[in-house]
Image (tube, helix red, strand yellow):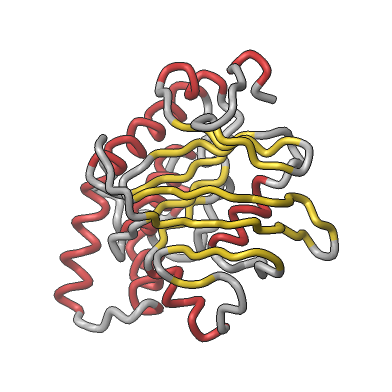
Amino acid sequence: MSFSSEPVVSLRDAAIFQDDNRVLDNVTFDISKGEFVYLVGRTGSGKSSLLKTLYADLDLRLGDGQVASYPLRDIKRNQVPFLRRKLGIVFQDFQLFYDRTVAENLVFVMRATGWTDSAKIKKRLAEVLMRVGLGSVDNKMPHQLSGGEQQRVVIARSLINEPVLMIADEPTGNLDPEVGEGIMRLFLEINNSGTAILMATHNHKFLQDFPARILKCDNGRVLDSQKEKFGLTNIW
């Protein structure tokens, strides 16, 4: 995938905090439009805190940063929903409403992000479900789906507003290897269509089979495989 040099993520000398603990320091990197980047590191190394800072769930207190042209430092609370409309966020634990159908889960997000035209909602709903290979599950409840299918619903949800960046936090962590590889291939298809992806993962096989740039959280720093040498054998 070729990608633009214009960054969708840019951090400069950023400090990442979890509560009052500084978990990462002097974080500096860019992610370009259309780029695929892995985020790796041991449990507790700051990966999730970094991702939460990028979608403004945690404040950026020190340093500078922007995501999808929104400044992270001192971002106003009323701007956060507009930032997140430009992002697709995928979690390990799905975070679906289990008392609503697949369609109702997606329509809830669409209504919350400004969709009002029922015909356009119906059309977009069908488009994103087809894109993730779930064209016939719209009236099913989440508990009627497999784990892999539920994660595909989450990915469909994240695609609704055509994000410039997808942030995925261990999206295959609760799935068996074969299903997880199918989800990984779906992310690659989305990336090939031009969406930048930042994926936190512990899956060593992905790094080997689908090589890409790696950011590694390590001892309070973020190492970049484009700038520093570190092998896959000691990635964690």
Q: Position of residue 150 (x, y in %)?
A: 44, 46
Q: Quadrant of the N terminus?
A: top left
Q: Is residue 234 left or right of residue 102?
A: right
Q: Position of residue 200 (x, y in %)?
A: 56, 40
- Asked whether the viewer can see residue 174, the reply is no
Q: Is residue 51 left or right of residue 219?
A: left
- Asked whether the viewer can see residue 115, the reply is yes
Q: Position of residue 10 (x, y in %)?
A: 49, 57
Q: Quadrant of the C terminus?
A: top right
Q: Nearer the viewer, residue 212 or 28?
A: 28
Quarter of the rendering containing residue 228? top right
Asked if 54 appears above or below 176 in the picture, the reply is below
Residue at 58% over, 68% down? 56
Residue at 73% over, 51% down? 25
Residue at 14% over, 75% down? 119
Quarter of the rendering containing residue 111? bottom left
Residue at 61% over, 21% down? 230
Q: Nearer the viewer, residue 67 or 153?
A: 67
Q: Nearer the viewer, residue 76 or 185?
A: 76
Q: Position of residue 99 (x, y in %)?
A: 50, 65
Q: Is residue 18 left or right of residue 223?
A: right
Residue that lies at the very extreme toward the top in this rendered image: 233
Image label count: 0
Asked if 2 appears above or below 205 in the picture, the reply is below
